[in-house]
Amino acid sequence: MIDYDPHDWRSHLFDIKGSMLQQISSRILAAVVWSAIVTAGYEYWHYSIKFADRLPLLPLTVHMLIGTALGLLLVFRTNSSYDRFWEGRRMWGNIINESRNLARSTSVLLAGVPDVQSRLFGWTMAFANAVMHQLRGSPHNLGNGEARLSAADVQRVLAHEHVPLAVARELTRCLEEARSRQAISDYQFVALDQNVQQLVDYVGSCERIQKTPMPFAYMVHLRRVILLYCYSLPLALVRDYDWWTIPASFFVAFVLLGIEEIGVEIENPFGNDDNDLPLEAFCETIRRNVEGMGGTSL
């Protein structure tokens, strides 16, 4: 995610990174070239051959009506994508909070079994890293949590099909060991394991966002309408605007294609794109908070 000052307009007017301009530039160029061809053809027929009345031009009113419907489709697209983005951010906020709660409680309740406490802290830090790599589909590692864990335990967990779930199992195993050594009561075990259960639930919510894209029919129809609108626009404007049809087509294509691409960019907020959530920063926050509860730094 790109950090920026929302009050500073001037520095953002010419930004390229994260602005979607690179992703839509080829489509905008195609629309501009097509509008130039339409305009040049109209001018040639209109002034040279005098057959302008026979050209297949479109009424501007038709485009205005279609533009209204297209605007509603784009609003729904961006709203749905932002809902997914914000839901992803909310779930990661919950992961951070539950990790803090687990570290806070065990820093006191497991003080009598420091070896178990240290391993639980390690698995708590490892959980966030496992979730990040699971959502991104990247090679797994357990981040700074590995320093508190044995190599055999790390390799066993990394060999699991669903690494975050395997880490959650290790968290419960640590709590069970603490209970068997009478460091915590049955009631405290249930309360602490509830934090682990919540962590697993939040991972499921993130996976629901990741694995459920926008409906295919909606996406295809919206893109078809945008392209038809942009490429037929010169036929509606050229009679009244002449050569100004070209910059008008550019601005319309820039606005419509940019809005659609923003929806694509943020509908899966867990990747490595410029506008995705800063998952590395979230994992680092959990590491600092957990180590702070332990009173030492790795």
Image (cartoon, grey):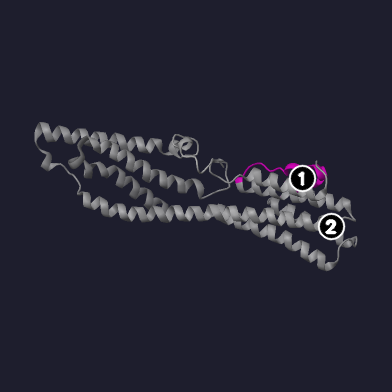
Q: Are marks 2 and 1 in contact (CB under 8 Å)?
A: no
Q: Residue at x 30, y 47 (%)?
A: 229
The residue beneath circle 1 is 145
- Crowding near pointer 2: few (<14 within 10 Å), some, many (20+)? few
Which label was assigned to residue 119?
none
Q: Residue at x 77, y 65 (%)?
A: 191
Which label was assigned to residue 108?
2
- Crowding near pointer 1: few (<14 within 10 Å), some, many (20+)? many
Q: Residue 271's spot in the image, x, y percent? A: 57, 44
Q: Residue at x 30, y 34 (%)?
A: 33
Q: Which residues are magenta?
A: 136-160
Horizontal side of 137 relative to 286 (left or right) equals left
Q: Residue 226's spot in the image, x, y percent? A: 34, 47
Amino acid type shown at disc 2:
Val
**Front residue of 12 and 52:** 12
**Front residue of 231 and 249:** 249
**Helix or strand or loop: what does disc 2 sit on?**
helix
Q: Earlier in the sequence, mark 2 or mark 1?
A: 2
Is the residue 171 above or below the residue 41 in the image?
A: below
